[in-house]
Amino acid sequence: MTTGGAPTVETIAERAGVSIASVSRVLNGHGGRPDTVTRVERAAAELGYVPNAVARSLKGGRSMQLTFAMQDIGNPVYVSMVREIQAITKAHGYRLLLHSTDAVVEDELAVLRSLADRTSDGLVICPLRITPEHLEALRTAAQPVVVIGSLPEDAPVDSVRADSVTGAEKAVRHLVETGRRRIAFVNGPADTVPGHNRQRGYRRALADCGLGLDPSLVATTDFTIEAGVRAVHELLEADPSVDAVFCANDQLALGAAQALHTRGRRIPEDVAVVGMDDTSLARASWPLLTSVDLGSAERGRIAAEMLLARITERDSSSRAPVRSETVTPRLVVRASSGPVRRGAEEETR
């Protein structure tokens, strides 16, 4: 028996005791007699045979692989998306490749350009920033692409977005309704799409509620737990009168809660806390965290369906118009934003 080197069609045929033609038919998905298929698949597994995606795509036009590129694979928002995207694409016979970009623009552009090597049949990408270079790479992408995020109206690619502006407005209005007036805002980088939109929603809600914008109550940092801890410590040092903290995501909110606990500030009696994204972190914090559900799972599902539709469309002569969908946000109220409890002396005034 032939030994050494990477397994080939010939070595698999020798191990399985069948013809090379039979092995080729099975490995290329054309089937054969049940016993032949079983023997070939068993021999391929024993020899550690791995199909070459490039060769397969060049021959059949499909690699049967899709890619999902996001900022941070450890972020619960993207975990929710991955579950939905993989469930749908796997049901259609695709393997899902994951790639963390760390929100580095050049990395995101490299992923878009890599579609030309045909190792992936399509891409779902979540860029935090949209640059002219992004738009050009999207326009010239060699394979179908769907963006999870906000794009200019004339962008030539399907997209699904969260309405972060409305979500932020819901959060701030809720805090005002519970009696809060000194509402701090801990945001991520303001030059990102989510940072910009959540800042807009915060400012708009303050204005609608008759509250002035106090720049000293706004902190701009990173979308991380550690950044939330630092930001809230700094906010309270500068202004101890803060009675609520609205955070641009749940990670920041978890950091805010840690800072408040460290400083002996009770949640929600002294300071209410509200996050965004309604991830698993919101249900794991104590007290349970009020958060704005931006439909991360739903966005993942819609994106996967859009991508599969575009891939199928390549086999037809017609092209559907570019699609853009928006998922409606929903405020999920929990214990971290209970109403203000005023002292007996204040109540009798």
Image: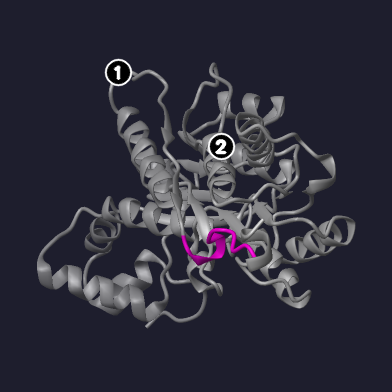
Would you say residue 222 is visible in this rendering?
Answer: yes
Residue 120 image point, x, y percent? 48, 46
Instruction: Kindly identify the amino acid type of the residue bearing the numbered disc 2.
Output: Ala
Residue 317 image point, x, y percent? 30, 18
In reply to whether residue 347 is colored magenta, the answer given is no
**Seen in the image, is 144 located left or right of residue 184?**
left
Along the viewing direction, whichever of 11 and 252 lies nearer the viewer:
252
Tell which circle, 2 or 1, labels the residue nearer the N-terminal end: 2
- Point out the stretch of residues depicted in magenta: 334-343
On screen, 159 above or below 339? above
Q: Residue at x 50, y 48 (%)?
A: 119
Cα–Cα gap, marks 2 and 1: 21 Å
Instruction: Kindly identify the amino acid type of the residue bearing the numbered disc 1.
Output: Ser
State the count of labels.
2
In reply to whether residue 338 is colored magenta, the answer given is yes
Mark 1 closeness class: few <14, some 14–19, many ≥20 residues within 10 Å: few
Q: Badges 2 and 1: C-beta atoms under 8 Å apart?
A: no
Which residue is farthest front? 348
* SS for callout 2: helix
Residue 322 image point, x, y percent? 42, 21
Which residue is disc 2 drawn over? 116
Q: Which numbered tag is attached to residue 317?
A: 1
Would you say residue 140 is visible in this rendering?
Answer: no
Q: Quadrant of the C terminus?
A: bottom right
Along the viewing direction, whichever of 292 and 85 lies nearer the viewer:
292
* SS for callout 1: loop
